[in-house]
Amino acid sequence: MTTQTLNRRSFIKLSAMAGGGIMIGLYSDKDLLAQQRGPAPAPTPINPNTYIKVHPDNTFTIVSKNPETGQGIRNSLPMIVADEFDVDWKQVKIEQADRDDKYGRDMGAPTVGQIEGGSTATPQNYQPMRNVGATARAMMVAAAAKQWNVPAGELTTGSGVVTHRSSNRTATYASLAQTALSMPVPELSTVKLKDPKDFKIIGRETKGVDNAAIVTGKPSFSIDVNPPGMLYAVYEKCPVFGGKAVSANLDEIKKLPGVKHAFVIDAPPPRPAQPPAAGAPPAPNVTWNSGVAIVADNWWLANNARKSLKVQWDEGPVASQSTVGYNTQAKQLAATQASQTPAGGGPRSVKEGDAEAAFKTAAKVVEAEYYFPLLSHAPLEPQNSTAHYKDGKLEIWSPSQIPQIFNAAVPAGIQNSDVTFHLVRAGGGFGRRLVSEYDIEVSKIARLVSDERAKQGMPSVPVKLLWSREDDMHHDNYRPTGHHFFKAGLDASGNLIAFRDFVASHGTTSVIPANEFPRGHVKNFWVSEGNVSPYGIPVGALRAPPTNGVSFVMQSFIDELAVAAGKDPLQFRLDLLKNPTTEPPTFSNVGFGAPFNAKRAIAVLESVRDMSDWNNRKSKLPKGTGLGVAFQYAHSGYVAYVVELAITAEKKLKVNKVWSAIDIGSETVNPTHATNLVQGGFIEAMSHMMAWEITIENGRVVQNNFDKYQPTRMRNAPPSIEVKFLKSEFTPTGLGEPSLPPAVPAIANAIYAATGIRVRSLPIGSQGYSWT
Amino acid sequence: MPYKLTVNGQSKTVDVPPDMPLLWVLRDVLNMKGTKFGCGIAQCGACTVQIGGQARRACQTQISTVNAPVTTIEGLSADGSHPLQKAWLELDVPQCGYCQAGQLMSAAALLASKPRPTDSDIDLAMTGNVCRCGTYLRIREAIHLAANGGRKA
């Protein structure tokens, strides 16, 4: 998919590097066209997307362009380049790229080129990174062929060395670099990629490139950025969403120990929403919330000053809203609208067949109401960003997952070209840093600080904005809630004949499962929605939207249907998957963004059935122990879990064992990190299951910190989570997200199997359950 | 006011308010960024250091109460050679890595008092240290690996 685009529109260029090495880059035709457009006014210089540096000592630096938040991309993208370049991983050092639009759309990304989101990095960069490595290798081979006057076809490579076997000659890439510089760059279409069976790095375990720094406490994270002279800021915002700061006792605050500056910051006037023209990059997001900034010598002093801060807030209309109100309205919507046929169709609602007529003929009708709450992302590193405004330019260090969207230039009052944007390792993302309003806030504060100091005749200084955990929990973009009102019909043989889901939501596609299984596997399928309104709570993407909630409701309700049909829940799913009611789509070998492929779902389910010895194990479980199963197609990956869980009469739960089978295509780039991500996805699901819930009262978040938002802890973690990656013929896709969603219903279904009690609402900690 | 303390064997004097938490003295006054801020209320363990060999939450330890030598992640070993650090690398424990300094400091205190801990010893000692990414299985395994002299059991 991206290959053709790249072959047609991208090319490789080599350039000399100070100190004798060379740099190898993948260029886009945008740069070329800009050059060809000259002479007026002046040709744009080619801006190399540099990926490989060949050093004189025959070691190599490979640039990682994407933000690293723990998903392991700083290993996996360079691994792909290194393998095709045919060097050893131990010869490679990794360098993190700054934000640069040269990494933009031409690398095949639909929106931006430097994003940690949507499990897109692997599928969108796999082919381009192979092209970079393979072309660079081809050039080294061509250089050796020229030097030795032998056919390139007689040459082999390995460990950064070209070998001519018959004459027993070898040359390092470093020694060939200068010759390579003078060689024509081959057309990408003529460059031969490795046969995957010859991969030496892709599919092998490479350990995190920052691990040594992490375990020895070297500054590695955004919060650790510490430029000389830095001051520390806090930013107090209205606890009610959308509220504004009117005034504050700034004079009093400025007298407190260590406090250097304090400002009331107004929100910008709302801009008219203009969708970007087709093909254009997304409009920069320059919205920020009003609030009060306090800047001090250290963060504790700045944060302490908040105790003395008195702000007059204009709380605005959201102050009358609450979770109780939203939930009441959701039930009213279900009562009044669930029987109405939705207008139109499209992705948000679907009606295939006639579910209502089928319910009348059904031998059994099952109805159930499901709910999942708002969630906060709670990455362990609270939101922060560091910026220095100096002489009309801004330098910023950020943990953003999407540095090309939130535009720090605008609040600093400068042009984008005057911003230097460093991507710094983030202490977790989970989607929270897809909204990096802290970058906006810090650039505004940094500008105000430098301007105020200039008036006092003092030099500018960098400013670190750090949110407290409470700030983080109170000002998130929350995983949206879902109220699902299900109804399904079974015939006398227990076959599913009709499936209905009415969703009460709040104007986001995030929770509408119109394309979910069992669509295509039941003749009458109907999903529609009603909107809770007004709804003033900001919502956003949490790891694996929308299936992080939808999988819980769909895979739990499917489980109910299996029970109602008197069938084994794993076999019931397989039977449905093997009997499509509409013609399945034709699949190419492209894994990314492909429609639901029942064969891949069947494969992971059958695999996890065999791994867990499902049938045999189920028949031998002691009382109070249950096996649960669930599968999900999420972010182009297929994941199935089986969970064995024990429960006491006091509703104390222990996850005994977990099995997981996964299909993310033909290669798992870095299996050690991939396994870690799957196990972590399950552990996160346990938090969703037991304890995580954000509630709203008077337009503000009730939960302050981890004491009221308990993450899964060591003592809750199961003794083992077995992970198996199936190799399919599809191009590789990402793993950050798919591992989470089906873990939640697999646990819920195990609770049912153990107790006969169906979990229909999350979290269960408020329903008397706890971990042992 | 001035406070004297020993951090990783070195004597330091800091002039800070008596109620300033050790965490912020380390991070913002001594510029030792290895110890992390996660919650500020001793719920997550990211700020775990050792004071007199005991695992303590630096965010809840006022500087005026520090009366024994402090060891931070920067001082766990001179060169990353502590058996736990080696085990962490061997098993590729980190995902985002943000909690791992605190995890290591808690684990080191555990091994100092219980050289061969059981799973339940580990669960008990480590349950105050949150890993949001969920690397608990590898942490558990790495503690066993270090306790076993680097040999897999």
Image: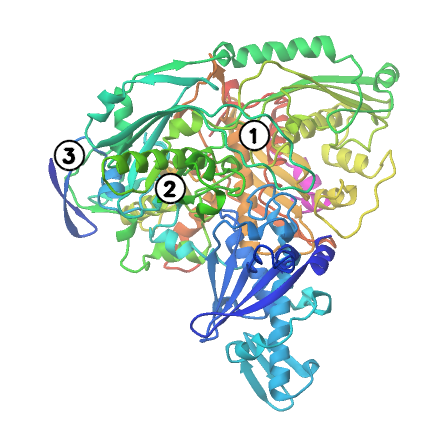
Residue A376 image position (x, y, % from top left): 49, 28
From the image, tell me which residue sits under label 1: A540
Q: Say what amino acid the circle numbered 1 marks.
A: Gly
Cα distance in 3D space between marks 1 and 3: 43 Å
Quick check: is A617 in the magenta stretch? yes
The residue nearer to you, when weighing A468 against B76, is A468
Question: Which corner quadrant of the image does residue A9 belong to?
Answer: bottom right
Dot 2 falls on a residue whose secondary structure is strand
Q: Which quarter of the picture shows residue A49?
A: bottom right
What span is in magenta?
Answer: A606-625
Q: CA distance from mark 2 to mark 1?
A: 25 Å
- Residue A464 shows in this picture: yes
Q: Who comes first in sequence, dot 2 or dot 1?
A: 2
Left or right, B46 with respect to A552, comes to: left
- Residue A715 appears anywhere in the view: no
For the residues beneath circles 1 and 3, the answer to whether they share a chain is no
Q: Position of residue A414 (x, y in %)?
A: 44, 40
Q: Is residue A224 left or right of residue A672?
A: left
Q: Is residue A450 above or below residue A108?
A: above
Residue closer to the observer: A659 or A97: A97
Q: To which residue does mark 3 refer?
A: B64
**Are the residues under badges 2 and 1 in a single subunit?**
yes
Residue that numbered label 2 is attached to = A387
* Count of numbered circles on the image: 3
Residue contact at pointers 1 and 3, CB within 8 angstroms: no
Vertical order, A147 against A255 (above or below): below
Crowd rating for badge 2 (residues with CA inside 10 Å; few <14, some 14–19, many 20+): many
Above or below residue A20? Residue A506 is above
Q: Measuring from the top left, give residue A744's x and y in whole percent.
A: 59, 32
The residue at 29%/32% (across/down) is: A295
- Find numbered disc 3 in the image and state the secondary structure of the residue it sits on: helix
Q: Are marks 3 and 2 in contact (CB under 8 Å)?
A: no
